[in-house]
Amino acid sequence: MATADLLSAHLDHRRSWDEFFYVYPVISRRSQGVSIGVNLNPDKACNFDCVYCEVDRKTPYRVKLVDLPVLAGELEEMIRIRADGRLFEREPFASAPAAWRRLNDIAFSGDGEPTTCGVFEQAVDLTFRLRNQHEPAAKLVLISDSTMFHRPGVQAGLRRMMEGPYEVWAKLDAGTEEYYRIVNRSRVPFDRVLANIEATAKWCPLYIQSLFLRIHGAPPSEAEIAAYAERVNRITNAGGRIRGLQLYTVARPTPEAWATALSNPELDAIAAQLKDLTGLPQQLSYGNGAA
């Protein structure tokens, strides 16, 4: 398969499929398989405003709230569409090699922060049941900024996920409050993010997912990465169980022209520094700045 075709497959992360409101498929570059996305923020509301976020908030949303029966119907149909091969009759999925056509996961990741959804717990439960019925080996994945991990309904949803194959990817893009404000541009205090990750990781082993990039041409400084490592070590020293660090950079166009991808050597240098400072396992995903 041509490299250009493979790039087309995994760079296309449009959160839409025909007339579906909540469910969409992507080819995941990290898992090298199909990921079925569950968008619990169809209104595109988010408590972060990341400089690298690719969500199109200029186009009006079609529906504001999550309708659980509709979500269940869409998810069950998407599972069938992948299983019977119809998914791969159109691009970019037709470009995916056979090895990448397996269902790796069903991920709560969409146009905002999924744990802010008022029916998060119920959405997890129905997804859990449909996964077990049709694709029991597929993981349930939550990609989250961790700001709502203290909510009882979110914790109940996480505990439900933990009853089967699961992963939680907790976002942490900074080591200092100042850099957090620059990159994530959130009104949520940085201390709350850190406290929620630490408290949750004590009973729910999770991954730290971090996007590092160039801001106005400059990668994060060694001091910023050292501060990040200190935050991570504080979590593990307190009893938090971090399964690994997912380190990546920009792979698609960003809304801010000054937010650009790291080169492969720059990401490698950050990974080497963090390996030395934390000793944690790493997964690296490179972007569009190979030089």
Image (spheres, grey):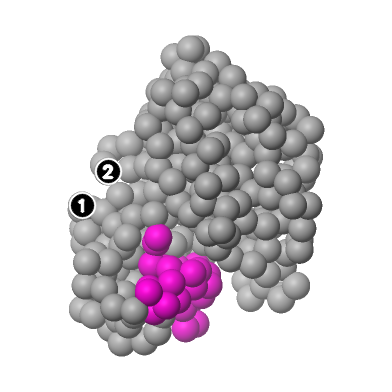
Could you tell whether 205 is left or right of 154 in the image? left
- Residue at x 39% of width, y 79% of height: 5
Asked if the magenta segment contains residue 27, the reply would be: yes
The secondary element bearing badge 1 is classed as loop
Residue 137, label in figure: 1
Amino acid carrying label 2: it is: Pro
Mark 1 touching mark 2, by CB under 8 A?
yes
| Residue 267 drawn at (x, y percent) | 54, 45
Query: Is 51 in front, or is 151?
Result: 51
Could you tell whether 97 is left or right of 225 in the image? left
Q: Is residue 251 visible?
A: no
Asked if the magenta segment contains residue 57, the reply would be: no
Residue with the mark numbered 2: 165
Q: Which residues are magenta?
A: 3-29
Corner quadrant of residue 112: bottom right
Q: Is residue 84 visible?
A: yes
Badge 2 crowding class, 10 Å Cα cut-off, few under 14, some 14 to 19, many 20 or more, is: some
Query: Is 282 in front, or is 268?
Result: 268
Q: Quadrant of the C terminus?
A: bottom right
Amino acid carrying label 1: it is: Ala
Q: Using the image, determine if residue 119 lies above or below residue 79.
A: above
